[in-house]
Structures are given as structure tokens and as C-alpha cells.
Amino acid sequence: MTVELRSVPDCPNLGPVRQALYAALADVGLPPVVTEHVGDYPSPTVLINGVDVMGGTGDGPAACRLDLPTSEQIRDALRRAITVEPVTNTATRLDLVDCCAPPGNAIRTDRPRHAQHLPPGLRQVHQAILRHFAATGTAPTYADLRPVADAAGMKTAETLRELARHDLIAANQAGRLVAAYPFSPTPTPHRVSLGNVDTYAMCAIDALGMPFMLRTNAVITSTDPHTGQPVHVTIANSAATWQPTEAVVVYAAISAAGRSVDTCCSTINFFTNASAARAWISAHPSLAATILNQDQAVTLGRDIFEPLLLGAQPPE
């Protein structure tokens, strides 16, 4: 199910309708994730599976709407959509959603499922890559991985190609790692301090998931790409503290197909507040984007990355 909220810039009625939408999602038991678009629309408009909850498709000239949808009307539209598209097997359905599918109802990714279904030797190589990043902040070399690959009866290059096929890592044409989600071997806007080790995350969600994967505390330092202002998140004992306290995450994708490093790592970022996030989304109309609040962003990061090192020894 896709849930969209469309508006014109600075729409005075957007806030109440947004509140009504989230209240309706909570009432019917659906994930509170909404794709927001700012542009030339009848404003505000709520679309469920592409259908305006007030009737029609939501297309038309930019204008302030007089027929504002209520929580009850949105709930009715959601319930009708649920009847058409049953969600009784939600866990299975969400597991099939790609990390960089156009955001909307994508609460989980298939990355944990792919990792859990790797042959044991290959999964050990994958976990060895993650543990090396956690211990050093840098990418492992072929020499670092060779003993683990040898134990799996595979060549190191072969293991990396297979892990890349599942988008658990990414490598360039020379075979060098360019991503080992959640880690980046090169600097990004998302710096993560893990005690005595500093490293970089591929995106904001990766940064939030990293301490849960490693079962440790972390301090994340990032930058709002719209305002240039810093955003800090401290995760201690699995609880996150945000500064500024109004900070949010934009979950956006260039495309639903391709490697995460190419399609969404650069477009999933921290923002100082929802207003800055909406302004950035408005300036990038080609992106499929949604704003995640702090709880949603932390939950998404934890769900994606916490399973990846289950059964592995934590880094020393």
C-alpha cells in the first residue's frame, strides 16, 4: 500500500491534515510512513494507492483545498485499501521490499534475509568484513579476508563478487570495496564514533543501525544538506538522543533498481527539522522521498542492521 501526502509550499492546512493522516494510520494498525511531495498540487491531498481519499486522482492545478480530509475519511479509505490488499502476512510482504524501493511503506529491507540465507562460509566472510570495519574503521584488504575465504573453500575475489550480488557490499571494477553496508571505506557526511574507533556510514539509516548491529554505544555527527547545520545523534544503551531535538531523516531514492550505493545512499540524510527536510525534497522533485521521524528512523536502522552480526562475536 502506498500513502502519499501532497501539498504546495508553505500550505497553511498541511499540519492538521498530516496529523489526521498519522492518526488514521495508527488507528488501522498500518506503519506510520508517508511519502510527502511538495509542488503544484491541490493542497493538501492524501492519496491511498494513488487515489485521492476525497475522490479522484489528486491531479489538478496548485490551489488550497476547501474539502480537507478528516481522520475518519482517511481511515475509511485505508480500510477499503486493506480490504483490496490484505496485510495479514505483513512480515513476509515487507521482507520483499528493497532497501531503495521508492519510500512509502518500506519499513524493512531484504538485506537481513539475504545475509541469513548465505552459505555458512560466505556469511563468515561477510561478518569478517563488518567486524574489521568495526575494529579499525577501515576496509579490510584481500590479505585480511583470505584466511576466512580459504576456510570457506572460496577465493577472496569470488566471495566479494557473491556478496556484491546480494548487495551486502559493493565493489568497483578493480575489486576494491566501495561499501560494506552500513560502513563506508571513504568519508561521507555521516561520521560515527564507536568508542576509540571512528568510521563512516553510507547514509543516515546506516549510521543509526550501526550501534545496534555492534551492540555498542555511538555518537553520530552529520550535516543537514539543506541548511549546512550539524546534526548529532548519541545512542547509549539502545536509546537515541538527537540534537537538534527537532531533527528528522529523509528517506529518498533515485531509483528502485540497482545497487544501494548508486540509488539511495547519497539521498538518505539527517535534517535539522521537518521544514528543512520538506524544502530539500521540494528542490529534488525527481526523488521518491518521505520524512521519517526519529523513532521511525531508529527502528528502520535497527531492523536492517541488527540481524547482520547475530551469532558473531562482538568486536574487541
Image: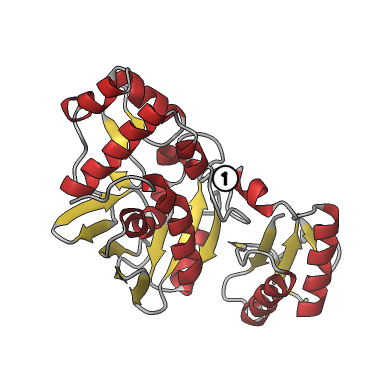
**Residue 235 x %, y %:** 31, 69
- 264 to the left or right of 285: left
16 up-or-down from 221: above or below: below
Which residue appears at 62% of the width and 56% of the height?
104
Q: Circle 1 sits on which residue?
A: 101
Label 1, residues with CA under 10 Å away: few <14, some 14-19, many ≥20: many
Which residue appears at 38% of the width and 63% of the height?
270
**Residue 227 x %, y %:** 35, 68
Residue type for callout 1? Ala
Q: Within the image, what quadrant is residue 233 found in?
A: bottom left
Q: Nearer the viewer, residue 67 or 205?
A: 205
- 79 to the left or right of 256: right
205 up-or-down from 124: above or below: below
140 up-or-down from 286: above or below: above
**Residue 36 x %, y %:** 60, 63
Residue 186 appears in the figure:
no
Which residue appears at 40% of the width and 45% of the height?
308
- 41 to the left or right of 274: right
Please say which color scheme the image uses: secondary structure
Q: Nearer the viewer, residue 81 or 16?
A: 81
- Image quadrant containing the N terminus: bottom right
Which residue is at the far left? 196
Residue 6 appears in the figure:
yes
SS state under label 1: loop
**Residue 102 x %, y %:** 58, 48
Q: Nearer the viewer, residue 224 or 313?
A: 313
Q: How many marks?
A: 1
218 up-or-down from 257: above or below: below
